[in-house]
Amino acid sequence: MRLSGLLCVLREEIDPGGRLEDQFAEAQAKGDISGMERVQRQIQRREDAASVDKAFREATGKDDKGARQSTRDMAKELGLDVTGKTNKELLDMIKADLEKKKQEQDPTKKGEKEKKDDPQEKKQEQQQNTLNASVREVLNVCIDISKKLPQTALGY
């Protein structure tokens, strides 16, 4: 599937029939900033729900075919408490739970790089830090000197 086809599928999933796009264009034509912001928030909520649904389907091994599952159903299936929670809160909880499960499955992708105890790399990093500090000092001295020199000496 080409990228343009993928974007069309995604657009139809988030904004079926282009209704939100039309509302945004109408609000833009009227100069209605609050209307434009409202439509943008609605599109963002739908994009968030679609991304959570996709991540949920990947995590649970369900197929990508068919309608999206409701946020409450996804939360119940993950064993989360849904009582008194808004859809936004549930989406955040589902995202956090899926990230937690993903990290548990693959502990090397925790977002932190493993530090290597290679003495050559440490020495090179130390040299780079020293060089950066020296450059900063020279720059600060140049700034201080240029403030004290008369404009004619600087050639302005």
Image (tube, helix red, strand yellow):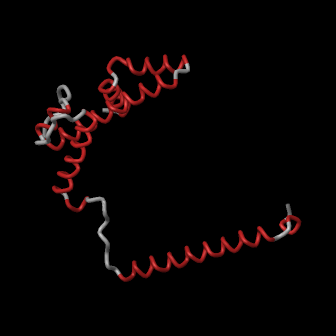
Residue at (52% x, 25% y) in the render: 33
In the figure, residue 154 lies in which quadrant? Answer: bottom right
Residue at the image point whose x is 25% and y is 33% from the top: 87
Furthest residue in direction front, as rendered: 84
User: Considering only vertical position in the picture, is 41 above or below 135?
Assistant: above
Between 9 and 131, the one nearer to me in the picture: 131
Q: In which quarter of the image is the C terminus?
A: bottom right
Q: Position of residue 112 (x, y in %)?
A: 31, 63
Q: Is residue 14 left or right of residue 100?
A: right
Q: Whole-percent x and y of residue 70?
A: 19, 29
In the rendered image of this protein, does residue 82 appear above or below residue 29? below
Q: Is residue 23 left or right of residue 90?
A: right
Q: Which residue is drawn at 34% across and 17% down?
A: 17
Q: In this view, does 14 lie above or below 94?
A: above
Q: Residue at x 38, y 19 (%)?
A: 18
- Which residue of the protein is positioned furthest toward the right in this rendering? 152
